[in-house]
Image (cartoon, rainbow, N blue to C red):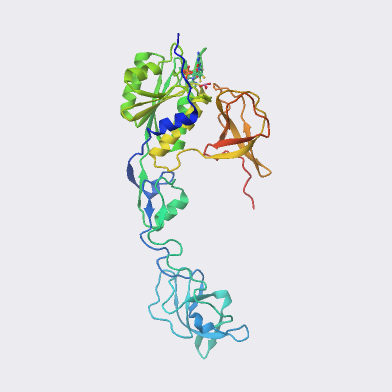
Amino acid sequence: MVEKRRPIKVREAVNRLMTFSSSGSVENISIEESYGRFLGEDLVADHDIPLFDRSPYDGFAFRSNDTEGTTRNEPCELEVIGEIGAGSVFTSRVGKNQAVRIMTGAQIPDGCDAVVMLEEAKEIDRSGKNMIQVRRPFKSGDNISFKGEDTKQGTVLASKGTYINPGVIALLATFGYKTVPASKKPTIGVIATGSELLEIDEPLQPGKIRNSNAYMICAQIERAGGIPLYLGQFSDDFDTCFQQVEDGMKKVDMLITTGGVSVGDYDYLPDIYQKLGANVLFNKVAMRPGSVTTIAEKDNKLLFGLSGNPSACFVGFELFTRPIIRTYLRCEHPFLNKVSAVLGNDFPKPNPFDRFVRGQLTIEEGRLIATPAGLDKSNVVSSLAGNSLIVLPGGTKGYQKGSNVKVILLEDQAGTSFENFTI
Ligand SMILES: Nc1nc2c(c(=O)[nH]1)N[C@H]1C(S)=C(S)[C@@H](COP(=O)(O)OP(=O)(O)OC[C@H]3O[C@@H](n4cnc5c(N)ncnc54)[C@H](O)[C@@H]3O)O[C@H]1N2
Ligand code: MOO
């Protein structure tokens, strides 16, 4: 008789697992390679931006006092004593009733405290002198970008664990980071088990299926920010699988297996953990799909025993492996984001376990709608292409279309049919 496993709640499973999470080391990479990585350290501004008061416009810099009482009919006239382009500095001090022609981005010359835009100033000639007329009073600071107004020295530009997107790259470049301290990516081994598995380029045969999980998991690892190391697929043979897991563990930061975690005659993973002397954190979770997800730890390395059923494998990865990868990458918020939405279809099937239904989140007339995708069975592949997981808490009743539900966003929103951006 097979020993009955005791399911634990998802939250408890996650909490138990997270006590074994740890962050990896930090490596310096070039800024060109940094897109899509995670910052390994807080970045602190070592100087002000802008570093000097500068002009945000092409125009004339002058002393605001000189424009006091000026009106459209009684303009003040200022003598233009020089000009300054972006990148140059005006070396002499600008005096009373004087102005300097200045270009966008150029440093405000000493003595000046305001800028009038080119279009607002009228250039005139007074006995060979180049003058401008200014037709309204200016206050000190008008049209000036001040030193430090963008970023003050000492400010945290971006905290460790921040995803390096193009905007973060702009910050890094502004502060001279030719090399960037990035969290080292974890290398995660992937082993597929099952005598029924064919490699994807093998012809189909009776009773056999293609190994889709290994490829799916590798892509999930990449999406989460890790490096997948596919170690191969192996038949249901205890000695072979044990050897592969034992050898695989030495090459990686964590290891994922798919298949063989249930209670069948060829489900060897529980015996493999035992022979390895691994500490099994849990082997049954009150969730569908993925109830058989089993996680063990050996010498501070985690072994994720994901189900062979594709949907169960997918969900097990997103709920358990992903936060471990994100913690390794130093993210402060390692879990996927959740939003509230309205259920787009009836979901009549009740279940005592919490369900994570694969689905598609859309916006219709400003409302978020979560629609379950296809057949809700854990061995189904066709429901996996959606952008979200709809959380349906366990209970005795199903859910009706229009119910309020929580939806986990699967981060890669490229396939999301949210309202298009049009002007
Ligand atoms: N008597 C019981 N039987 C089962 C139970 C149970 O509690 N008692 N649990 C069921 C649940 S729930 C699930 S989920 C599955 C989990 O089984 P395993 O994780 O051990 O996976 P396998 O048996 O190896 O395979 C399950 C299914 O998935 C297909 N598979 C396997 N590997 C791959 C792959 N790499 N790519 C695509 N598909 C794969 C495999 O052919 C099977 O159809 O157990 C239930 N049974
Ligand atoms: O682990 Mo199974 O997917 O709950 O159906």
Give the quarter of the image for residue 382. Answer: top right
Give the quarter of the image for residue 407. Answer: top right
Position above or below: 4 against 110: above
Spot occupied by residue 331 in the image (x, y as percentages of width and height): 42, 42
The residue at 51%/17% (across/down) is 204
Spot occupied by residue 343 in the image (x, y as percentages of width and height): 65, 34
Spot occupied by residue 155 in the image (x, y as percentages of width and height): 40, 58
Horizontally, is 278 left or right of 104 in the view? left
Position above or below: 363 against 386: below
Horizontally, is 106 left or right of 72 in the view? left
The residue at 35%/53% (across/down) is 178
Spot occupied by residue 102 in the image (x, y as percentages of width and height): 47, 74
The residue at 34%/21% (across/down) is 244
Horizontally, is 274 left or right of 72 in the view? left
Position above or below: 18 against 115: above
Which image quarter is the N terminus in?
Answer: top left
**Residue that lies at the very extreme toward the bottom in this rendered image:** 127
Residue 236 appears in the picture as rendered: yes
Residue 203 appears in the picture as rendered: no
Question: Which residue occupies the foreground of this view, 30 or 66?
Answer: 66
The number of callouts visible is 0
